[in-house]
């Protein structure tokens, strides 16, 4: 059962449907306009996604050849008062903020103030000894090994809670051990971006929120983009909803749509504090590609290139851009945030797709490539993950291995990192059985990777199979003796059964 499906009928209201006609944009009308037939097909597809996932409100924008060619708003921004989404509705973009932080750091690189290969200790004083050698690139690409500051925040609001102050949070996280040796593993981590915010503050002589406004929002014409969280008054804001399977500690018979409350402490907002519109995001992408934010193509290419692990292999992240597809055809870079907002830029195709929703867990990153396919059908057809997902929706997730074998005959092998990320998105939304099939597939495709066994073990644990969880954690630890996650889980499982 899809936990995102509304238990009651949800009216999907289309508020605006525009191409370039009549848009008050800095760019002229695009030479490319989708045919009405393809526009109708895309509209039907988007309605279907909203209905299937139970998304209350959504904005979609498409940029092609430097122009906004598609802008559409659906549903309700605010369910309590039936406020419709318009192109001015503002959505939280959560971790998509990190892409803006990547641009801010590259602006400092272009200004000669920051060296991507320099250790963070060159720019920030008073750090623990183990943190000091970590480079700026390693922070941007989440291979630092530094402990995650979210571990000391409130698990309910992600705010400071009883800690009270930034200083108190820093003292707690600085006392934690490193998660792994720098450069050897990937771990998504908010501390990395707090440190990058300190670098931006230092060299700009002003708060990073002001720097972002002056050097990105204003040049791009982003009049509706601003920092803030549930504590702030944000004009035209679309609050976030999510489906819950339990309420007041009691398990529900069907998932219930609920409101959410989130805090982003000011010093952490380089990682997840922005709110925007799809059209503002489109303007930002246009400005970035037209050289209004970064001066050279070299800087832009560096921003969109993967980092490196210590062994020389590429990371799954570019510099602040974590939704990446480094494939021979139709390279794509972008970011997702809060499992509710996402975008992809296709540099070689001069195309970009932005989807913002107000449903946590809707994971629009899953269908960005399909939207791109209405402008270039070869994009989804050449993507292994999209091809796999479409087939599994028809044939069932238990067919993951045979379907992947068929795709490999067409030279479409799913990427380990992308497959792992997709599986975790499913598991976080309650689709543990589907995620389990993808984790099994990843083990089948990448049997020498320690991480695939670690992920499979976690799904076995979620499904209540402790014996096979232990077996796979043990296999992961044998391949990577430094895997603290596997060691910790094995410890807990051992204590549980003693």
Image (cartoon, grey):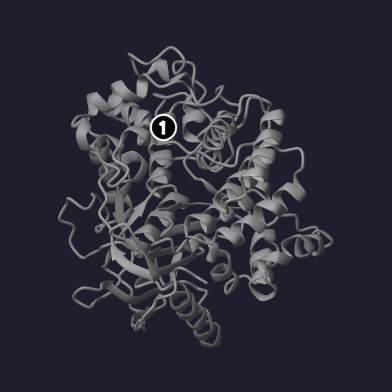
Is residue 122 placed above or below 199 in the rendered structure? Answer: above
Residue 298, given in percent of the width and then of the height, sits at 54, 38
Residue 234, given in percent of the width and then of the height, sits at 18, 57
Classify 10 Å Cα crowding around label 1: few (below 14), some (14-19), many (20 and above).
some
The residue that appears at 58% across and 45% down in the rendered structure is 458
> Front-most of 117 and 458?
458
Image side of residue 465 versus residue 14, left or right = right
Total numbered labels? 1
Q: Residue furthest right?
A: 409
Residue 417, given in percent of the width and then of the height, sits at 62, 46
Q: Quadrant of residue 369?
A: bottom right
> Front-most of 283 and 136?
136
Read off the residue under disc 1. Answer: 148
> Front-most of 117 and 395?
395
Q: What is the secondary structure assignment of the residue under circle 1?
A: loop
- Regarding residue 85, the answer to whether it shows in the image is no
Residue 240, given in percent of the width and then of the height, sits at 30, 61
- Regarding residue 249, the answer to whether it shows in the image is yes
Is residue 60 placed above or below 17 in the rendered structure? Answer: above
The residue that appears at 81% across and 64% down in the rendered structure is 406
> Front-most of 320 and 430?
430
């Amino acid at each position: 059962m899809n936990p995102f499906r509304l238990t009651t009928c949800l009216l999907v209201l289309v508020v605006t449907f525009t191409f370039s006609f009549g848009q008050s944009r800095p760019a002229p009308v695009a030479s490319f306009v989708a045919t009405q037939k393809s526009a109708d097909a895309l509209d039907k597809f988007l309605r279907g996604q909203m209905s299937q996932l139970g998304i209350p409100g959504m904005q979609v924008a498409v940029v092609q050849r430097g122009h906004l060619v598609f802008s559409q708003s659906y549903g309700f921004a605010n369910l309590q008062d039936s406020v419709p989404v318009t192109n001015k509705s503002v959505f939280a973009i959560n971790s998509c903020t990190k892409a803006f932080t990547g641009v801010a750091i590259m602006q400092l690189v272009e200004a000669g103030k920051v060296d991507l290969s320099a250790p963070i200790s060159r720019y920030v004083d008073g750090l623990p000894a183990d943190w000091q050698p970590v480079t700026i690139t390693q922070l941007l690409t989440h291979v630092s090994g530094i402990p995650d500051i979210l571990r000391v925040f409130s698990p309910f609001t992600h705010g400071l809670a009883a800690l009270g102050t930034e200083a108190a949070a820093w003292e707690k996280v600085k006392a934690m051990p490193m998660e792994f040796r720098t450069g050897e593993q990937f771990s998504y981590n908010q501390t990395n971006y707090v440190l990058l915010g300190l670098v931006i503050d230092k060299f700009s002589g002003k708060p990073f929120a002001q720097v972002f406004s002056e050097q990105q929002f204003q040049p791009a014409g982003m009049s509706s983009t601003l920092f803030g969280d549930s504590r702030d008054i944000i004009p035209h804001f679309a609050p976030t909803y999510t489906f819950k399977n339990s309420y007041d500690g009691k398990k529900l018979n069907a998932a219930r749509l609920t409101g959410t409350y989130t805090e982003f402490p000011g010093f952490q907002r380089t990682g997840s504090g922005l709110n925007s519109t799809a059209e503002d995001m489109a303007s930002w992408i246009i400005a970035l590609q037209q050289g209004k934010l970064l001066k050279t193509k070299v800087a832009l290419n560096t921003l969109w290139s993967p980092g490196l692990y210590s062994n020389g292999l590429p990371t799954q992240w570019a510099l602040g851009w974590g939704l990446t597809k480094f494939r021979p055809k139709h390279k794509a870079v972008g970011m997702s945030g809060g499992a509710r907002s996402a975008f992809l830029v296709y540099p070689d195709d001069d195309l970009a797709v932005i989807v913002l929703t107000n449903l946590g867990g809707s994971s629009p990153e899953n269908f960005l490539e399909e939207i791109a396919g209405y402008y270039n059908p070869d994009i989804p057809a050449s993507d292994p993950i999209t091809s796999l997902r479409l087939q599994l929706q028809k044939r069932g997730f238990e067919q993951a291995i045979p379907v992947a074998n068929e795709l490999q005959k067409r030279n479409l092998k799913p990427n380990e990192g992308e497959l792992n990320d997709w599986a975790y998105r499913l598991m976080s939304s309650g689709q543990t059985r589907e995620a389990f099939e993808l984790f099994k597939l990843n083990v089948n495709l990448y049997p020498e990777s320690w991480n695939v066994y670690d992920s499979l073990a976690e799904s076995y644990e979620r499904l209540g199979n402790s014996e096979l969880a232990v077996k796979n954690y043990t296999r992961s630890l044998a391949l990577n003796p430094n895997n603290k996650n596997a060691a910790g889980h094995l410890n807990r499982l051992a204590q549980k059964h003693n």
